[in-house]
Amino acid sequence: MRLRFLTPWLVGAFLVGGVLAALPRVRAAEGAAVPAPSAELPATAWRTLSQPVDGFVVPLPGVPRATTQDALTPIGGIAYHSFTLQAKDGVGYSVYWFDYPPWVLQLKTPAQLLQQAADWLVRTMDGRLTGQGTLTTGRVPGRWVSLSGPGQAVQARFYLSGARLYQVEAAVPSAVMAGPDVRIFLASFRLLRRTPG
C-alpha cells in the first residue's frame, strides 16, 4: 500500500483562537509496505512547479494534483488550495495555502498564527513532536516542525506572507527512510511576488 490522500473535506481542525477551519490531511496507510527510496533522483525526474499567481515555486519529483475547496468556517468562507503528489517511493509531498480574513490578523501575531498551525498539525496527525523551530524566507516569518505519527513521519514548514498561510509538507511512511528528496523539496520552496491572476 502507499500513502493515500484522505477525503479532502473536514478531516482536520485548525484552531484560530477557538475558531474551526477545515483542512485536508495526507496520511500513510497503516502497515504500509513501501520499497526503500532510491538515491538522488535524476534531474529529469524533477519538475519545477511555478505558481506566480499563488506566490510560490517548488521542485517536485513528479506532477502534482491541484485542488481548491471552498469551505464555510466560523471565520467566514475561505478558499483552501493544495498541490499534492504521491511519489513512487510512497512519500507524499504537499503544498497547502489559504488566506486569513483581515480581522484574524488583527487578533493574532504572525508568531501566534504560525505556532497554532504547527500545533494543529501535531493534533490532526495524532503525532508526537520530534522537533520544531522558527525560520524565515527573506522577510517572511516561518516555523518548522517534525513529528512522528501512526505509520509515518512528517516534516512541515509554515510561512505567513501577509494574510496567506503556506504549509509545505512531506509525509514519509514508516517503512521508508527520509532521503535527500524530502530535503530538496522542503529547502527549495520559495515565495514569489504574487502576480494578478
Image: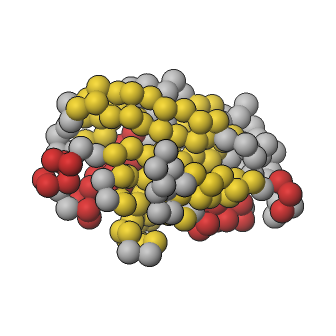
**Which colour style is shown?**
secondary structure
In the picture, residue 188 is in which quadrant? bottom right
Q: Is residue 144 left or right of residue 4?
A: left
In-front residue for pair 51/31: 51
> Exactly how many numbered labels are in the figure?
0
Picture residue at 35% right of the left edge, 27% below the top: 71
Taking the view exactly as shown, the residue that stands out farthest to the bottom is: 138
Taking the view exactly as shown, the residue that stands out farthest to the left is: 107
In-front residue for pair 60/90: 60
Q: In the image, residue 133 lies at what x, y percent?
A: 39, 70
Picture residue at 23% right of the left edge, 59% below the top: 112
Q: In the image, residue 78 lies at what x, y percent?
A: 33, 34
In-front residue for pair 89/157: 157
Picture residue at 67% right of the left edge, 41% below the top: 64
Decide if residue 182 is in sight here.
Answer: no
In the picture, residue 18 is in which quadrant? top left
Q: In the image, residue 95 lies at what x, y percent?
A: 53, 48
The image shows residue 7, relative to residue 13, as above or below, that is: above
In the picture, residue 67 is in which quadrant? top right
Taking the view exactly as shown, the residue that stands out farthest to the front is: 196
Q: Is residue 66 left or right of residue 156?
A: right
Picture residue at 26% right of the left edge, 62% below the top: 110
The image shows residue 29, relative to residue 104, as above or below, that is: above
The image shows residue 66, relative to residue 182, as above or below, that is: above
Q: In the image, residue 197 lies at what x, y percent?
A: 49, 45
Decide if residue 112 is in sight here.
Answer: yes
Q: Is residue 107 left or right of residue 160?
A: left
Q: Is residue 123 left or right of residue 65?
A: left
* Rendered-image quadrant of the N terminus: top right
